[in-house]
């Protein structure tokens, strides 16, 4: 009887723990980042909606979903399209789908016509992005700069940097990015405040 009671208690504890992990706690860091973001709140919300709609649209279109590796990142209304499409027709289809999304003010087309990169290369790109983000968190000389407001996207060793920055901030960000291993090229999609 005692053993059954212990098993029931253990099972209940595990069940409660499992259920509580399904709903993550509120992300206070995201709220703090929003306060430091140089974009108006409505634009941040719009950019997230652009990304969400692009993700849904590209994944709901079977020939794009099955044959392409495409990502859309939005910043201040500009939609950066990265990845690979094996044909010009598929590339045009991806771009047209993103252009049709409300509030997209500019298309930054960096979608290459080639076969999608391998999962190993995609994993390496994630490591490069993590390395860059870690380096940005070490910046102490620019008091107004918040590294979380810079979007870093890596595709096949090419690093795309998006954000609203001062020119001196942009130089530091670019120089730090150059120092990270695996970076083949840097493309800035910055808006400058000065």
Image (tube, rainbow, N blue to C red):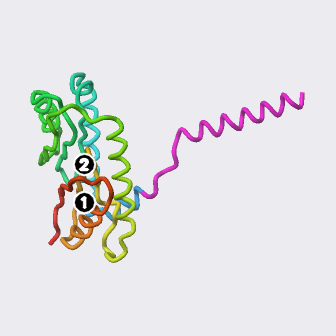
Q: In percent of the image, x 37 and y 64: which residue is there?
A: 135
Q: Residue furthest top?
A: 62
Among numbered discs 2 and 1, the one appearing first in the sequence: 1
Relative to 30, residue 24 above or below:
above
Relative to 175, residue 94 above or below:
above
Across and down, in percent, residue 88 comes to 9, 30
| Among the 4 quarters of the image, the one containing residue 98 | top left
The residue indicated by pointer 1 is 39
Distance of label 2 from label 1 (alpha carbons): 10 Å
Q: In percent of the image, x 38 and y 54: which residue is there?
A: 130
Q: Is residue 158 left or right of residue 125?
A: left
Q: Secondary structure at mark 1?
A: loop
Please tell me which residue lies in front, 94 or 4. 94
Q: Is residue 159 left or right of residue 119?
A: left
Q: In percent of the image, x 71 and y 38: which residue is there?
A: 13
Q: Which mark is residue 47?
A: 2
Across and down, in percent, residue 30 comes to 40, 55
Q: Is residue 46 left or right of residue 26?
A: left
Q: Which mark is residue 145?
A: none
Contact between labelled residues 1 and 2, with CB atoms less than 8 Å apart: yes
Magenta stretch: dominant secondary structure? helix
Across and down, in percent, residue 192 comes to 16, 66
Does the magenta portion include 87? no
Q: Dot 2, how many residues are within 10 Å of its Cα: few (below 14), some (14-19), or many (20+)?
A: many
């Amino acid at each position: 009887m005692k053993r059954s009671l212990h098993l029931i208690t253990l099972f209940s504890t595990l069940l409660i723990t499992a259920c509580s992990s399904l709903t993550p706690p509120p992300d206070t860091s995201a709220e703090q980042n929003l306060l430091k973001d140089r974009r108006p709140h409505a634009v941040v919300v719009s950019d997230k909606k652009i990304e969400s709609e692009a993700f849904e649209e590209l994944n709901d279109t079977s020939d794009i979903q099955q044959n392409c590796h495409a990502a859309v990142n939005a910043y201040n209304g500009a939609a950066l399209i990265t990845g690979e499409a094996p044909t010009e027709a598929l590339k045009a289809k991806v771009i047209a789908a993103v252009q049709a999304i409300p509030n997209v003010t500019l298309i930054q087309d960096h979608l290459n016509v080639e076969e999608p990169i391998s999962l190993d290369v995609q994993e390496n790109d994630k490591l490069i992005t993590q390395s860059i983000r870690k380096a940005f968190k070490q910046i102490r000389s620019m008091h107004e700069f918040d590294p979380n407001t810079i979007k870093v996207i890596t595709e096949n060793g090419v690093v795309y940097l998006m954000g609203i920055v001062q020119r001196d901030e942009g130089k530091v960000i670019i120089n730090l990015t150059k120092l990270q291993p695996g970076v083949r090229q840097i493309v800035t999609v910055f808006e400058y405040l000065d």
